[in-house]
Image: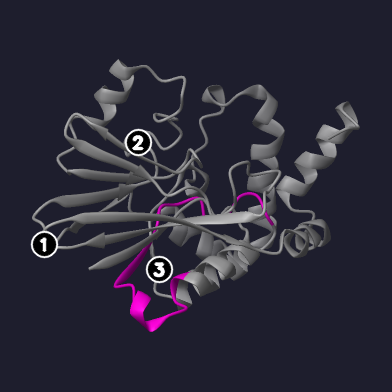
């Protein structure tokens, strides 16, 4: 069984097209399932295209913090309040309400039985707290284990942090596919990242992959639609012309 796992698209339709093209480009690379770990919108200006592409490619979707209807303002750095509010306003004004409602009701996790008898659990960050940056470098080992140790699955795959990695802790494998949108959301780099998981009876293989996409084309879309990341970058330049 071969899985493709993507995460944190943030409305970047140009990057998502490049990733899906890469995933499905060769018959010998046939993928049984494609999972998306959330954060479909909120950022770039191609939200409708993102949903269309996900649906056309039968991508199974999980809710991320930016797909949720509730925003814990007190837990968000005040420097980012402008951006989060811009995201909410833009989605409300530019995306179909039925789509927003459907996304807000997506499941928090998907479990996949693996060929070797183990179970893979895919989720966005912390299934009990979508905004919890549980896998960041500032989290202590005790906090880390408090969230992940009780989970029954053997392989935990999550997004949110935008940093690809494979860790082995306490008998569990912890895997992040990276972000379709790049490592720094509001200032995109040139690489869209995803993960291939190949499950066999005697082994489990992870292949971290990235593809180049047309950043300038997406930036032009963002400019034309006055997308939230475009607004945020303009605001930064008011304070630092070098940005």
Give residue 126's mark: 2
Residue located 61% across and 55% down the image: 191
| Vertical order, 107 against 65 (above or below) | below
Asked if labels 2 and 1 touch by Cβ distance under 8 angstroms, the answer is no
Residue located 81% across and 61% down the image: 220
Between residue 196 and residue 92, name the one nearer to us.
Answer: 196
Colour option used: one colour
Residue 176 picture location, percent across and down = 40, 44
Q: Reading the chain from its start, which is encountered first: label 1 or label 3? A: 3
Asked if residue 119 lies left or right of residue 94, the reply is left
Q: How crowded is mark 2: few (under 14 residues within 10 Å), some or many (20 or more)?
A: many
Hey, which residue is sitting farthest left in the picture?
117
User: From the image, which quarter does the C terminus lie in?
Assistant: top right
Q: Residues within 10 Å of mark 3 (few under 14, many from 20)?
A: some
User: From the image, which quarter does the N terminus lie in?
Assistant: bottom left
Give residue 59's mark: 3
Between residue 155 and residue 124, name the one nearer to us.
Answer: 155
Q: Name the residue under label 1.
A: 201
What is the magenta range?
Answer: 23-44
Q: Is mark 3 on a helix, strand or loop?
A: loop
CA gap between label 1 and label 2 equals 29 Å
- Dominant secondary-structure state across the stretch colored magenta: loop
Query: Residue 219 is drawn in which quadrant?
Result: bottom right
Residue 217 picture location, percent across and down = 76, 65
């Amino acid at each position: 069984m071969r899985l493709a796992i993507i995460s944190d698209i943030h409305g970047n339709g140009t990057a998502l097209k490049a990733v899906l093209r890469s995933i499905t480009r060769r018959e010998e690379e046939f993928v049984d399932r494609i999972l998306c770990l959330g954060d479909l919108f909120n950022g770039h200006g191609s939200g409708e295209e993102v949903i269309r592409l996900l649906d056309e490619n039968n991508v199974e979707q999980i809710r991320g913090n930016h797909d949720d209807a509730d925003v814990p303002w007190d837990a968000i750095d005040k420097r980012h309040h402008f951006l989060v509010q811009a995201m909410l306003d833009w989605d409300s004004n530019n995306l179909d309400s039925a789509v927003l409602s459907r996304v807000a009701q997506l499941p928090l996790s998907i479990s996949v039985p693996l060929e070797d008898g183990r179970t893979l659990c895919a989720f966005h960050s912390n299934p009990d707290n979508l905004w919890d940056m549980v896998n960041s470098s500032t989290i202590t080992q005790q906090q880390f284990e408090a969230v992940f140790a009780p989970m029954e699955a053997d392989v935990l795959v999550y997004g949110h942090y935008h940093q690809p990695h494979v860790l082995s802790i306490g008998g569990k494998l912890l895997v992040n596919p990276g972000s379709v949108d790049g490592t720094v959301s509001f200032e995109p780099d040139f690489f869209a990242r995803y993960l291939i998981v190949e499950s066999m009876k005697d082994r489990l293989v992870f292949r971290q992959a990235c593809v180049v996409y047309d950043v300038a084309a997406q930036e032009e879309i963002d400019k034309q639609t006055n997308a939230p990341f475009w607004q945020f970058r303009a605001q930064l330049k008011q304070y630092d012309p070098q940005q």
